[in-house]
Amino acid sequence: MRTEVKNDGLFCELYWGTTLNEARSFGPELTRVLAAPDETVPLPLYGFTLPEEPFLLAERTETGYRVFVPPAARLERSRNGDAFGPVPDAELRRTGERAWLELTPEDRLRILEGELSLVLAPSVAGKREAALKPKDLIWLAMGAALFLSLPVGFLFAGPSPEKMAESNARAIAAAREREQAERKRLGVDTPARPITQEEQPDAGTKVLPANLGVY
C-alpha cells in the first residue's frame, strides 16, 4: 500500500525568547487563520501589534498558505532546514497595505516583534490520500478469504460428539488401570475385612474414686 501525505495544514509556535508558550495546528478545512490577543480566535497572539482585531494571519491558496506580516513585525525565513534569515522587502508581496509571503512546503517563516516570535510551518495534519494498487487488492482479498475460512474449517474438521465420548471413556479406563496398579504395588489391593462384634477389644472395667462425682 502506498500512502501519500500532503502538507495541507499549518503549524504555529509562539515563543517568548526561547520559551515555547503556545503551539497550534490547523487542518486544511480552516481556510483563514485569524489572530488576536485573546481566546476568541483560532490563534491567540499576545504581545504583537496588530492593525485590527481579529487579524488575518494566513489564508490557504492552491499551493500552500499566504502569510500576512503585522506592520510592526519583521519576517525571517528558513528554507530546507537552514538557519533563519531576513526576508528582503523586494520578495514581499502586497495587497493594499498588507505585506505577505507565500509559505511553501520547503519553508519555515518566523515573525518577530520584541522578545516574541511566531514560527509558521507546513503541517502534515491535513489530508492523507491512500492509493491501493491491483496487487494490494489481491492480497487483501486473499487475507480476508483466509480469515473467514478458519472458523468454517474448524467446524468441519473438529471432533464429533461420538469421538469425544469415546475418547473420554478411554481416558477414564486408563485412569482406573493406573489406580489399580498403584494399589497393587502398595499392597492395598485386597479389600479390608470388616471387624465383627466378637472381635472388638474389651476396654475393661474401671473403678472411680468415691469422692469423684459424675454430673
Image (spheres, helix red, strand yellow):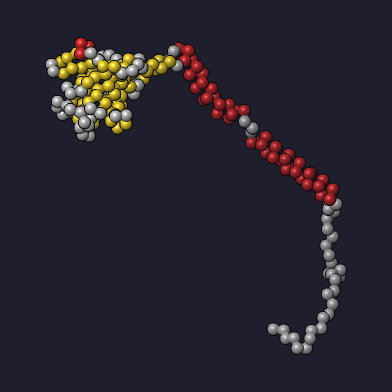
Residue 26 visible, this angle: no
In the rendered image, residue 79, in percent from the top left (x then y), is placed at: 32, 15
Asked whether, in this view, residue 81 is left or right of residue 169, the answer is: left
Q: Residue furthest left?
A: 96
Q: Residue at x 54, y 24 (%)?
A: 149
Asked whether, in this view, residue 149 is left or right of residue 89, the answer is: right
Q: Residue at x 35, y 16 (%)?
A: 82
Quadrant for the C terminus in the image: bottom right
Q: Residue furthest top?
A: 90
Q: Is residue 215 above or below residue 125?
A: below
Count all numbered tags in the image, as a single digit: 0
Q: Residue at x 20, y 11 (%)?
A: 90
In the rendered image, residue 168, in percent from the top left (x then y), is placed at: 69, 40
Residue 147 visible, this angle: yes
Q: Is residue 129 above or below residue 44?
A: above
In the rendered image, residue 7, in percent from the top left (x then y), is placed at: 33, 18
